[in-house]
Image (tube, helix red, strand yellow):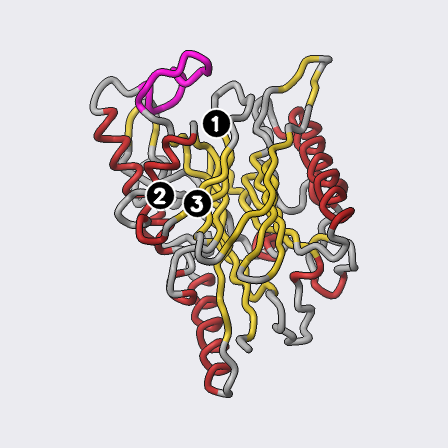
Amino acid sequence: MKKYTSFLILFLLGISLTTAQKKGKQYNIRTIAFYNLENLFDTINDTSINDEASPMMELKSNRSKVYWDKIDKLGSVIAQIGEDKANTSPAIIGVAEVENLSVLEDLVKNKHLITKRYGIIHYDSPDKRGIDVALLYQKRYFKPVFYEAYNPNIYRNNRKVYTRDQLLVSGYLDDELIHIIVNHWPSRSGGEAKSRPLREKAAYQNTKIIAQVREKDPNAKILIMGDFNDDPTNSSFKEVLKTKAKKKNVGELDIYNPYEDLHRRGFNTLGYRDNINLFDMVLISSPLLDKGKKDFSTYKMYQANIFNKRFLTGKKGQFKGYPFRSFSYGGYTGGYSDHYPVYMYLIKEKK
């Protein structure tokens, strides 16, 4: 894995921003992130869902200790994402694999995050495992005005697939209206080819949400984030969402995927059974793309990246070199998540 190129990118980003400031330009820098929290379940048996099969509930002892240690570790990671350039944790962060609202409340009250005053937007989804997506936001930067959960209504062999909702949140980042879609698409259980149509249908649901947003806001600034269980070059992106990898090819209604280039260069956000994948991404609509004009009078994407610091990577065992996961073979490893977080900087020139 190419672990260190991202640090060089961030170093160069810092030089660029610092140089601009010296020339008399100052920027607001806001971090937008996504993080799969890897089975963030509480220790209470919920009979309405299949949480008995969760790694947390499978532990034979010390569940409470493990739970609070995991909360602390996740809080420490979130607090660091983008902090070196934005001087704070993400203004907005989408999360996946959370059991309920309660675990999110515990997370944002953690010592690493409590001073950030994160708000929470969450719906219980129909997923059989009882895992949901949600959005956390710093109240001083983001003001939600609309949110709704959409189930992709996926069927296979005339039977409904109970998967995660897709969460749409619209609101004001400082004084600019933006729209965020948080995703956790169906897994590759049964194999990539067999499960591919499920993710294509999930992608199609995204296109419907995007169309709904654009009906009311034709020039909509849209961020599409999530654990997609697909790489940037899979059909769900290239054929359904019709994502573009190069800025010069992005038309007015197109979606730009900055992670396609990172994928091409060998970066990843997870590894499993000797396969590495880049399933976690943040995509943007055309109005958030600068296209080389250096016009940052409104919020535009400056850089997209993977938060893959060394402490988040396993140092030994079967998962050496992969994200340092929390659970393995029915036990707690003391890790963070089996996914790296992803993030991007949006910047705007101060008036």
Identified at 29% across, 43% down, the residue is: 110
Marks 2 & 3, CB-CB < 8 Å contact: no
Instruction: Name the element at disc 3.
Output: strand
Magenta-colored stretch includes residue 48: yes
Identified at 53% across, 44% down, the residue is: 280
Residue 27 in the image: above or below residue 184: below
Q: Which residue is mark 2?
A: 108
Measuring from the top left, give residue 259's x and y in whole percent. 59, 53
Around disc 1, counting alpha carbons within 10 Å, would you say few (fewer than 14), some (14 to 19), or many (20 or more)? many
Measuring from the top left, give residue 245's x and y in whole percent. 68, 56
Camera-side mark, 2 or 1:
2
- Residues shaded magenta: 43-58
**Precedes in sequence: disc 1 or disc 3:** 3
**Precedes in sequence: disc 2 or disc 3:** 2
Estimate the spatial distance between the alpha carbons at disc 2 and disc 1, rounded to whole Å. 18 Å
Residue 82 in the image: above or below residue 159: below
Q: Which residue is mark 1?
A: 131
Instruction: Name the element at disc 2.
Output: helix
Camera-side mark, 1 or 3:
3
Measuring from the top left, give residue 95's x and y in whole percent. 47, 40
